[in-house]
Image (spheres, rainbow, N blue to C red):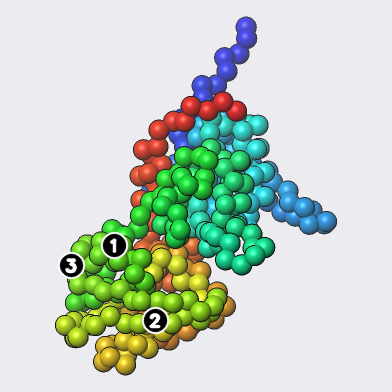
Amino acid sequence: MTPTAPAPMTRRLLLPLPGSEVFGAHLAAAGGFELAGLESRRFPDGERYVRIEGDPRGRAVDVVCSDAGEQFLTVAFAADALRDMGAAEVNLVAPYLGYMRQDARFRPGEAVTSRTFARLVSSVVDRLVTVDPHLHRFGSLAELYDIPCLALRAAPLIGDWIAREVTAPLIIGPDAESEQWAAEIAARAGAPFGVLAKRRLGDREVEIRMPDLTAHAGRQPVLIDDIASSGRTLVAASAALRERGFPPPVCVVVHAIFAGDAYAEVAAASARTVSTDTRSHASNAITVTSLVAEALTGLPHLPLAH
């Protein structure tokens, strides 16, 4: 008698890559998903070794990685292995999506890395799920990526956190392009808002102009930004607020990069510095895992043929 093949499992399988294990575990708990293991190391010559620990047959598998730029080869190797093992679809969950900065050629010979990276990712996974990608010159990820993309928004979570944690807040966005985002967070927090005028002079140097905030004297300023990398915008804005008689601000960012000593500088200039957990960092105070879990649960099946 021929043994009956096991029925395909439909429960989502999460595969966190190195550095995203904590987020992956919290995401699995929030959505009731199963976690797969990953054995990853380097051979003596530096090449990568990848082995999947889990059964992806007939299932949607979400590779979780907030550093997909640096770990692209691991993403690609894992995606191919999962398909070889019978996964129905392989998605990339990148709470923080890198390589969005260089979206144009500003000087002759520059690589437009956002387009190249999008082409590479689109070639190895079936779908992309991310949080607040840094769209500057593009209206949506669909202008870059050739796969279905879902860009989730952390603004409601940030607004709710501010409403709970900050008394009499005054929301201040980082630049004119953030006005709609700042307005949404302010409405959620029940607060007034303003936006800075900013001119970037280099990778670590910015020039800002503060709006007229005299009508909001006595309120607690809350500086918001989607990405804190060098931290110079937050530090410069903090100094400008003190010059105008405001207390040190609360700083809230979506993606905590904080390169070098940026976090220490921002923390020294602020009353409190917090971030979402799209990247693991000491400042994490607002989790987006329930937001991502809800989105994954509601994803329609893709008509795929591997």
Rounded to the nearest whole Å, what is the CA distance between mark 1 and mark 2? Answer: 19 Å
Kind of residue sitting beneath label 1:
Gln
Kind of residue sitting beneath label 2:
Ile
Of callouts 3 and 1, which one flags the residue occurring earlier in the amino acid sequence? 1
Question: Residue reaching furthest front?
Answer: 108
Observer able to see residue 87: yes
- Place residue 253 in its image quadrant: bottom left
Q: Left or right of 188: which side holds 20?
A: right
- Residue where numbered disc 2 is placed: 208
Of callouts 3 and 2, which one flags the residue occurring earlier in the amino acid sequence? 3
Q: Left or right of 157: which side holds 61?
A: right
Q: Secondary structure at mark 1?
A: helix
- Front residue of 24/66: it is 66
Q: Are marks 3 and 2 in contact (CB under 8 Å)?
A: no
Kind of residue sitting beneath label 3:
Gly
Q: Residues within 10 Å of mark 1 (few under 14, many from 20)?
A: few
- Residue where numbered disc 1 is placed: 180
Q: Is residue 189 above or below residue 56?
A: below
Q: Residues within 10 Å of mark 2 (few under 14, many from 20)?
A: some
Image quadrant containing the N terminus: top right
